[in-house]
Image: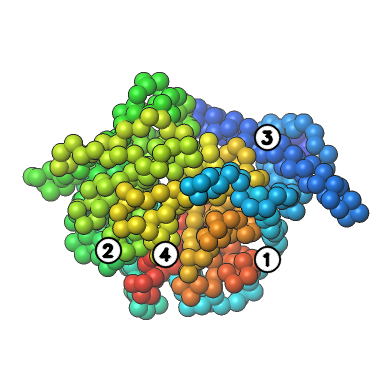
Amino acid sequence: MSESKKKITIEEASDTTSEIKVETQQSKGALVERYLRRRAEVTEADNRAFQDYLQEKALQQKTLQESTQPTACVEAPAAKSSWFNRRNLLKVVAGTAVAGETAAVGYAWVNGGPAGAPAGGLFTGPQREPIARQMTDSKADIGGRSLGKWILLLPTKLGGGTYAIDLNSNRVLASIWYWTYGDYNPISHHLCAFPSADPYHSFEFVNSTQGGKNCLIYGIPTRMETPDPGFNIYRVRYDGAQMELLENVSESTGLGLGVHVTINPKDAQSYFVTDGQKDIAACFDRNTSRVMAALKYDWAANSSNLSDCWQKGGTLKIAKIYPDPKTGKFDYLGTKGQKIEWEMVPMGELYVEEGTIPGDSVHTLTGADGTIWHPSGRWAATVVRLCGGIAILDAEKNFAPAAFLQFNKDSPDQYDVTQIDSDHWEVTFDRVFSPGHEIGFSPDGKFLCMMNNLRENNCGVFDSSDPDPKKWRKIAHVEDPLWRGKYPNPFHMVFSLDGSKLYLSVLHPAPAASGIMVVDTKTWTIKKEIQGIGPDLQTPAITYDGKYLLAPFSGFQRLSSGIAVIDTATDELLGILPSSGGHHDCVVVPTELAHMKHTRSCTL
């Protein structure tokens, strides 16, 4: 690594607030710097719009209170035009986004019942029923309270490793750091754990890692000019005392994949790893690491204009890919085969449309970065982010595509999957209304959810109870009346143990604090929102006794970080566990096979 010729630091720009400088200590190339500048501009615009939204809702709350309970009116700040630049972005957003949301805590539509219920029973439009909104105590502490004999695994993103917390003692049980094995760009991204009857004695997990330029896109000062390729899949074992690396599955197979990892809940003998930079989903045998099936997703657009590439429709092409018969390995190690040079971060799909994320094959990108399992293991489902839908794969037919579900409000429920030959399938779209992101099955497999991010900003729900996925149909869209534009944004999810509640992480534009939303799955209405937990709140997990929800937040962008602990009986925040990792994922180690349907294997 060479010293930089140009050094740019964060400079103080005023007496009260510092100007945000996204450039790093050295030039990492014009494209990365352009992306960082554009991301800062978008963040600034998002936060400006978010403040306008908070002021508007506060004014609506004041007006509603004055008209209904004039004697109990709570003074709310008057609406005024907002003005933001990089100087006031961090402090104003971090300090007032929560306060502004507090002013909107009591806001609710006066009319009862969900809006827009046509004869077919599909509920659309923002919810009109009252929603309880609770602000959290940012100083909350669980005081050493035991959360049960469970072990929580957390990857550390840019920290380059993974560690486990004993929830019984709230102590770190063990950790592993992949740079010690010679991986000098080990962005520990996603993971999933196999069942273990006694995880305090031993357990095993699979951990995907990113690489390449993904380490440069957060504006963190670095001397790296050409980061190592990375993109390794690690199989790791805890032996009762420490974690040890068993195998680099990428080296064994030639498939370097870096995003979601999900284990088959039927028998825990296979697992998917899916990568949205390469648009590849591969299923591996647990014992031999043999690739059981690998599918590649490509987009053929109707328009050659990048800004219209997905919105104006096109054809999704799905193909089985195979290893070189001579070597028995694929040719996708490291950054090889990636279509874009760094990931689409959460809410980052529109950076692709505007050309801010470069790559060798941007026009063919689909954003296929996660494959979940039906709780029975009968079906798998790959999220195709830029198409706003899910490809359903038949696990009994070597994962051949069987259906394509579309979650956008105004789209058909499904698009036909046409088989071209034994290894190729196509799905043709007239248009795509909005990108999507995270997906998940309920524990009984009767419902399937997907987040419609950015242009629609809701959670779409399918009835997936029919044995034939071609008959699965949209039944609801969960939408808060406070959601406007991109934010607040529903993101990761997990169901309660009995499936009666859906917990969603709700993102506010960082560094504003995000929260958790509780949805009643009988009516698909919002019961409660726990606001102000922390920035960039990520994947929630549930203990297998059903008592606690655990939700890590932030870290990898150098912001406040921790693990929120929520009592699922009352849906109250109990406290915050300290955590210095940059978590984008977490999983409670299962102690029996039945627990797998509650893990990251079935919900992202």
Q: CA distance from mark 4 to mark 3?
A: 39 Å
Q: Amino acid at mark 4?
A: Pro
Q: Residue at x 73, y 53 (%)?
A: 105
Query: In the rendered structure, are the residues bearing label 2 and label 3 in contact, judged by CB atoms less than 8 Å apart?
Result: no
Front-lying residue, 258 or 413: 413
Q: Which mark is residue 48?
A: 3
Read off the residue under disc 1: 140
Q: Which mark is residue 246?
A: 2
Spot the residue most to the left. 326
Q: Amino acid at mark 3?
A: Arg
Q: Residue at x 26, y 46 (%)?
A: 401
Mark closer to the chain start, 2 or 3 = 3
- Observer-side mark, 2 or 3, equals 3
Mark closer to the chain start, 1 or 3 = 3
Q: Which mark is residue 62?
A: none
Mark closer to the chain start, 1 or 2 = 1
- Observer-side mark, 1 or 4, equals 4
Q: Quadrant of the C terminus?
A: bottom left
x and y percent of residue 587 in the render? Answer: 44, 63
Determine whether the residue tagged by mark 2 lies in a helix, strand or loop.
strand
Q: Amino acid at mark 1?
A: Ala
- Observer-side mark, 1 or 3, equals 3
Say if residue 234 shows up in the picture.
no
Front-lying residue, 218 or 568: 568
Q: Amino acid at mark 2?
A: Leu
Read off the residue under disc 4: 443
Spot the residue most to the front. 119
Number of numbered markers: 4
Q: Is residue 84 above or below residue 449?
A: above
